Amino acid sequence: MKFNYKCNGCGAEFEISPDIMLCPNCAAKQEAGKPLRGLLEVEIRGDLPNDWGAFDILPVPGEFFPPIPVGNTPLWEPTRLRAATGFPNLYLKDDTCEPTFSYKDRASFLVAAFARQFGIDEIAVASTGNAASSMAGVGASAGLKISVFVPKSAPRAKLIQCRQYGARLIPVDGSYDDAFELSLEYSRATGTLSRNTAYNPLTIEGKKTAAIEIFRQLGRTPDYVFIPTGDGVILCGVYKGFKDLLRFGLIEKIPQIIAVQSDGSPNLYLAHLAGDFGEPRKSSTVADSISVDVPKCGYLALRNLGEFDGDCIIVPDEAILKAQLELSSTSGLFVEPAAAAAYAGFKVLSGKIATDATVVLLITGSGLKDIDAAAKQISSLSKPITKSIV
């Protein structure tokens, strides 16, 4: 199989190398306060290998991947949740059990392998927490130096993860978007490989693997996939996975994909309604992992949603926290607020979906990533006892 980059704007093709992240012609048209221009996707040529798996159709040879078990996560069949919602074919794609407890490991895994292939020893990343802790953990396995730029308001558990894995932590007095720009400045000044989401094409490519796993686990494509969405990179990664399956003739159509945002960070939703991106709205949401002012993958996300009949909806933080508690108490899966947004979005649209439809909720991060947020939905913890209560 052969791989190359292709610009989703002008269609220009490039050899895959550390020297290119965006299409230079389209990137030259970048506007302030708007999503990235010139995003690149990996194009595959050739036939599928025999006995292939999701990680066999990535553009880095297998020997460069670090020894950490990323991917192949479970697809839950939550009996009680199915009964409670009336959807007997409801599934949970559980990426809380990735090595660093989030979906971001899929992208970090590929970026780390790419760095090892080209002899690069340092990776820099901007993150609200999950991509940082993910790159730090995967980087530790790969023997790479990791520098992470994280808003100082990021959940403490994610910051502790970064330090435990040995990453260099640079707290940023500002938003994720501020951290993104500072990280790029550092990468350009030092020659460090950037893992910044969307900016590095491999972040989209790595995140396609969940779509391929879902197809293989179900033996078919689902009717709907609900995806918590901030930057839009997971959304575009899942689309990429299904597009690859379509290109290889393994599926006949792409499922209807629903991007779910918090109403406190609705910039992709607003652009979906308007048909383009306007002045970004300042984000403030309990779901920190999907809190983004300018969705870096926004133009590609809008294109995918339009081409494949997808949708983008918003849910309030109150509904996200309620969904988090319902998922925990009904299925036994404790998820962080961003991941709970997928279930909250499903609840909003469930009345418009046939109850026999096959629905997959993409569960992107563990609730232990942010226990302070989870505590907001719990009135109190039990007081310790001093004698038997029997």
Image (tube, grey):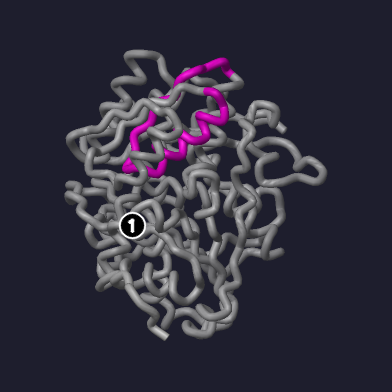
Q: Which residues are magenta?
A: 118-143
- Residue for badge 1: 371
Looking at the picture, tell me which residue is in the foreground, 187 or 9: 187
Residue 67: x and y, percent?
64, 33
Residue at position x 40%, y 40% in the image: 161
Q: Is residue 184 above or below residue 68?
A: above
Judged left or right of residue 47, residue 365 is left
Judged left or right of residue 188, residue 111 is right
Residue at position x 55%, y 40% in the image: 206
Please check the rendered image and state whether residue 123 is part of the magenta-colored stretch, yes or no: yes
Looking at the picture, tell me which residue is in the foreground, 151 or 368: 368
Residue 177: x and y, percent?
25, 38
Looking at the picture, tell me which residue is in the foreground, 155 or 212: 155
> Is residue 309 visible to the viewer in this orientation of the structure?
no
Residue at position x 50%, y 78% in the image: 81
Q: Residue furthest front?
A: 387
Judged left or right of residue 305, residue 149 is left
> Is residue 115 visible to the viewer in this orientation of the structure?
yes
Q: How many marks?
A: 1
Q: Secondary structure at mark 1?
A: helix
The quadrant in which residue 124 appears is top left
Callout 1 crowding tier (Cα within 10 Å): few <14, some 14–19, many ≥20: some
Residue at position x 53%, y 80% in the image: 80
Name the amino acid, label 1.
Answer: Ile
Quadrant in which the N terminus is drawn = top right
Residue 5: x and y, percent?
54, 30
Quadrant in which the C terminus is drawn = bottom left
Residue 331: x and y, percent?
50, 73
The quadrant in which residue 147 appears is top left
Please check the rendered image and state whether residue 86 is part of the magenta-colored stretch, yes or no: no
Looking at the picture, tell me which residue is in the foreground, 234 or 105: 105
The quadrant in which residue 260 appears is bottom left
